[in-house]
Image (spheres, rainbow, N blue to C red):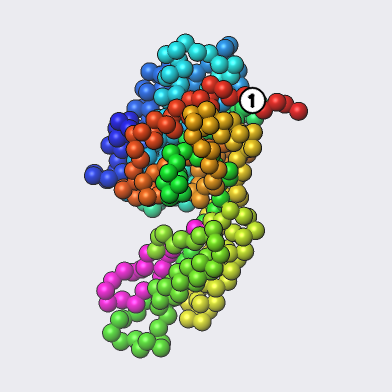
């Protein structure tokens, strides 16, 4: 809990937590984590995309690893456990193994992923994609809100954009990826459970949208002659809410919306906004995205404004491997706790790593299911239970028998 507090102090916002990819704050958080990894007995380094990577050798050097971890970046005005808890818990587990002089028949690596939230650039999971070997070179050209490209930001961080592919790992090097993370939802709390086994990570599609109308004088243009981009955007917001509200488990969010020129006496001429649609089934999500875009298109056509849509992210449902779920479940049961399986509505680094190896996740209860909010909270007792279960899982981990 102290380490989560310490990480939360490295923030762009005083009095809150905002730490985005390749920022000064991230460099400071990385230094802390590198130090903790070394204290825990690991060799530790920054990889080519800015992830922090610690490694504890197994019974002999060079064995394939069980990869553990989570992310070190945050959303804007974040809570201090989303991501960070998984990194510090994994380091704590390694610390215990190392202190006891244990050497397992596999290596352990702990990764603090540099970009899971996708807040800075219009791309997400940059850190874990690079590790999975699915980083796309064109992502280097994406720019942040100040016009800095990912290529420039990597250089500013002391990294070489031409070498990002060196962060990629080979399938033979990684036996599995396991992540401890707060649930970010209310299910475990409602059922009085401290931990749960994740079955799958819901898929997500994100778009950047733009409506171009005509800016004009707020006093002179009659209502019926306006091409108000914000009024059209308001219809789009409600269309998405209505479409996603029709089905259980389907969710849609417009989390960012900016009207220009943004003056009290000017009809908005341009609006830029985003949507994020998620569901436990790919076909359900695809249908909702298609319908939402068609609804928005129609609303804009009716208002004679131009609608543009640009897909930013389209991540399929990432299933957790049954053999890893079984081993996480066994660790929970061995602690005398009920084994509750649940899907993850939130995205995680495992969505990218599933391209490299099988994945599994352990969820830890959080207060009222609140997350992506500074009110995010967990109890120290739950953090301890989570870490104990995770350690038991690691100690007893059996790689999948090769066919
Ligand atoms: C990441 O936390 C996401 O689910 O957006
Ligand atoms: Mn998050
Ligand atoms: Mn997270």
Q: Which residues are magenta?
A: 258-277
Relative vertical location of residue 66 with respect to residue 239 in this rendering, above or below: above
Q: What x and y, as percent, mark residue 9?
A: 28, 37
Q: Give the quarter of the image for residue 329.
A: top right
Q: What x and y, as percent, mark residue 340?
A: 53, 42
Viewer-closest of 286 and 201: 201
In the displayed structure, does residue 305 sit left or right of residue 15?
Answer: right
In the displayed structure, does residue 42 sit left or right of residue 60?
Answer: left
Q: What x and y, as percent, mark residue 35?
A: 36, 22
Q: What x and y, as percent, mark residue 268?
A: 36, 74
Answer whether residue 294 is visible to the viewer in this image.
Answer: yes
Residue wearing tag 1: 399
| Residue at x 43%, y 18% (from the top left corner) | 96
Image quadrant holding the N terminus, namely top left
Image quadrant holding the C terminus, namely top right
Check residue 375 for magenta coloring. no
Relative vertical location of residue 160 with respect to residue 279 in this rendering, above or below: above
């Amino acid at each position: 809990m102290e380490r989560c507090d310490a990480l939360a102090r490295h923030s762009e916002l005083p009095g809150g937590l905002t730490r985005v990819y390749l920022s000064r704050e991230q460099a400071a958080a990385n230094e802390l984590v590198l130090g903790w990894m070394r204290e825990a007995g690991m060799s530790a380094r920054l990889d080519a995309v800015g992830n922090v990577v610690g490694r504890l050798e197994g019974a002999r050097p060079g064995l394939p690893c069980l990869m553990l971890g989570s992310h070190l970046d945050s959303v804007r005005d974040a809570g201090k456990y989303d991501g960070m808890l998984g990194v510090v818990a994994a380091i704590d587990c390694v610390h215990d193994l190392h202190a006891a002089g244990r050497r397992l028949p596999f290596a352990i690596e702990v990764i603090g992923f540099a970009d899971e939230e996708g807040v800075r650039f219009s791309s997400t999971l940059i850190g874990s994609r690079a590790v999975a070997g699915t980083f796309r070179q064109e992502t280097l050209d994406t720019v942040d809100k100040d016009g800095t490209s990912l290529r420039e930001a990597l250089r500013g961080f002391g990294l070489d954009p031409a070498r990002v592919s060196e962060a990629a790992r080979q399938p033979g090097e990684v036996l599995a990826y396991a992540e401890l993370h707060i649930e970010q939802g209310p299910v475990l709390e409602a059922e009085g459970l401290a931990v749960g086994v994740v079955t799958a990570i819901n898929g997500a599609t994100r778009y950047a949208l733009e409506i171009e109308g005509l800016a004009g004088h707020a006093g002179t243009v009659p209502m019926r002659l306006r091409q108000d981009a914000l009024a059209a955007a308001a219809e789009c917001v409600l269309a998405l809410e209505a479409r996603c509200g029709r089905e259980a488990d389907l969710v849609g969010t417009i989390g960012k919306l900016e009207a220009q020129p943004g003056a009290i006496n000017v009809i908005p001429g341009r609006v830029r906004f985003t949507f994020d649609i998620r569901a436990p089934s790919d076909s359900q999500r695809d249908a909702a995205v298609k319908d939402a875009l068609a609804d928005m298109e129609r609303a804009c056509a009716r208002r004679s404004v131009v609608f543009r849509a640009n897909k930013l992210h389209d991540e399929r449902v990432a299933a957790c491997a049954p053999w890893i779920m079984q081993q996480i479940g066994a660790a929970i049961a061995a602690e005398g706790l009920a084994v509750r399986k649940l899907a993850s509505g939130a995205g995680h680094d495992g969505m990218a790593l599933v391209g490299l190896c099988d994945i599994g996740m352990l969820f830890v209860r959080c207060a009222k299911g609140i997350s992506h909010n500074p009110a995010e909270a967990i109890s120290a007792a739950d953090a301890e239970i989570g870490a104990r279960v995770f350690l038991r899982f690691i100690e007893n981990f059996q790689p999948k028998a090769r066919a």
